[in-house]
């Protein structure tokens, strides 16, 4: 039933754009305009449905809103009549829905507001920032301030098992190596199993001992992420000595934190991108960021001009229905929150790409691990 109401609301909204009423409009107590509006002066009328009309200009607009492939089918009179018939049926359903009071249904009112906000963000707010506002100087400044993003050395990824003493390290290593040699394809899984059984490094233990990506000893161009564990220098040395992904260093190494068994789990080749190589992607990134900031400022100005009051005690009383299976998310993009595609207040499509070195990026993005196709 809800889906039916949403469809009817969409029909009604589109009808207000494409079909011009011929009687004065009235305003409901909720402020939503309903009923016929003033007569149109848009020109020739191709169809009348009661006191509503579809003008030639509106008919052409509807036709030209179709995809290029669909438009190519409407060159004959017969095809145009078929399309007009679909508009008439559309209008009849909208009128019938309005007569039966569906326009006052809360679900329809919500869908109407969503459609209006989408129209607002699509036609007015989109001009707050334009791509041409991002100058070459802006692009060059971002490039120079973030050289680490564009000029990167080779990096290696490793996991470790940390134990308290050398005797324990050698005992674990003696049990680990034969199992990996017996089935090299499961080398990483076997290592992760041993991490959970033996490692005393709790932060990395939950991630199979993952130390993420790091450079060669002494390499300063590799930028650590805030959540990246500090890799002991001896571990950095032996990890860079390993050749293949899945290979385990044959000797445990000692650091100030204890003794480590080290496995190579991935790598990234070095690369250097010039300003010319990345100027387009930088411009697009700055555009998305500025557009998001402009949207936030726009919404804040609306909030400043309105009286917004929130009762947190009442908010806390809201009960969430238990979820039974997966349900599609019908919320529009501009109402979605973190983890659902976009942040509150952002325009649809303004989410930024994931940063390099994401913990879930096992092999480092577009660089495949050694030994894979």
Image: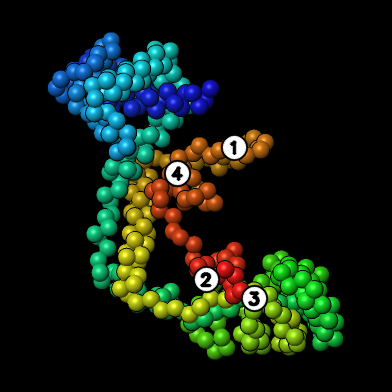
- Crowding at mark 2 (Cα within 10 Å: few <14, some 14-19, many 20+): few
Image depth: mark 1 or mark 3 in front: 3
> What is the C-alpha distance between the residues marked 4 and 3?
40 Å
Q: Which residue is mark 2?
A: 367
Q: Quadrant of residue 174?
A: bottom right
Asked whether, in this view, residue 339 is left or right of residue 47, the answer is right
Image depth: mark 1 or mark 4 in front: 1
- For the residue pair 278 and 100, the one nearer the viewer reads as 278
User: Can residue 191 be seen here?
Assistant: no
> What is the C-alpha distance between the residues marked 1 and 4?
16 Å
Dots 1, 4 in contact, CB < 8 A: no
Image depth: mark 2 or mark 4 in front: 2
Q: Secondary structure at mark 1?
A: loop
Sequence-wise, the earlier of marks 2 and 4 is: 4
Q: Could you tell me how many numbered marks the image carries?
A: 4
Q: Which mark is residue 245?
A: 3
Q: Which mark is residue 333?
A: 4
Q: Which residue is mark 1?
A: 327
Residue 150, horizontal then vertical, whole percent: 41, 75
Asked whether, in this view, residue 45 is left or right of residue 225, the answer is left
- Crowding at mark 3 (Cα within 10 Å: few <14, some 14-19, many 20+): many
- For the residue pair 276 and 317, the one nearer the viewer reads as 276
Image depth: mark 4 or mark 3 in front: 3
User: Can residue 181 be seen here?
Assistant: yes
Image quarter in which the C terminus is found: bottom right
Dots 3, 2 in contact, CB < 8 A: no
Q: Secondary structure at mark 4?
A: helix
Sequence-wise, the earlier of marks 1 and 4 is: 1
- For the residue pair 303 and 344, the one nearer the viewer reads as 344
> What is the C-alpha distance between the residues marked 3 and 2?
13 Å
Dots 2, 4 in contact, CB < 8 A: no
């Amino acid at each position: 039933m809800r889906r039916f109401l949403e469809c009817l609301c969409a029909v009604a909204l589109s009808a207000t754009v494409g079909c011009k009423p011929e009687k004065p409009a009235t305003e409901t107590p909720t402020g939503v305009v309903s009923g016929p509006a003033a007569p149109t002066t848009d020109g020739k009328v191709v169809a009348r449905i009661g006191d509503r009309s579809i003008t030639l200009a509106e008919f052409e607009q509807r036709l030209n809103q179709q995809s290029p492939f669909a438009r190519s089918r409407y060159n004959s009179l017969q095809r145009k009549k078929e399309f007009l018939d679909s508009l008439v049926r559309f209008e009849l359903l909208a009128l019938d829905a309005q007569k039966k009071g569906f326009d006052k249904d809360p679900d329809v009112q919500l869908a109407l507001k969503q459609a209006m906000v989408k129209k607002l963000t699509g036609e007015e707010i989109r001009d707050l920032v334009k791509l041409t506002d991002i100058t070459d100087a802006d692009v060059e400044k971002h490039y120079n301030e973030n050289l680490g993003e564009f000029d990167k050395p080779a990096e290696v990824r490793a996991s470790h098992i940390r134990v308290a003493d050398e005797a324990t390290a050698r005992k674990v290593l003696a049990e680990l190596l034969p199992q990996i040699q017996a089935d090299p394809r499961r080398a990483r899984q076997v290592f992760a199993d041993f991490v959970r059984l033996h490692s005393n490094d709790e932060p990395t233990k939950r991630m199979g001992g993952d130390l993420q990506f790091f450079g060669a000893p002494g390499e300063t161009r590799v930028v650590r992420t805030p959540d990246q564990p500090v890799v002991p220098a001896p571990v950095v040395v032996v990890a860079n000595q390993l050749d293949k992904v899945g290979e385990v260093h044959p000797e445990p190494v000692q650091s100030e934190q204890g003794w480590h068994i080290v496995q190579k789990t991935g790598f990234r080749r070095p690369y250097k991108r010039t300003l010319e190589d990345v100027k387009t992607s930088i411009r697009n990134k700055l555009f998305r960021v500025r557009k998001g900031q402009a949207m936030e400022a726009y919404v804040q100005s609306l909030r400043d001009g309105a009286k917004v009051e929130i009762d947190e005690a009442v908010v806390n009383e809201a009960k969430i229905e238990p979820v039974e299976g997966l349900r599609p998310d019908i919320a529009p993009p501009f109402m979605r929150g973190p983890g659902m595609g976009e942040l509150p207040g952002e325009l649809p499509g303004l989410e930024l790409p994931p940063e390099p070195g994401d913990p879930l990026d096992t092999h480092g993005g577009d660089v495949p691990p050694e030994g894979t196709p």
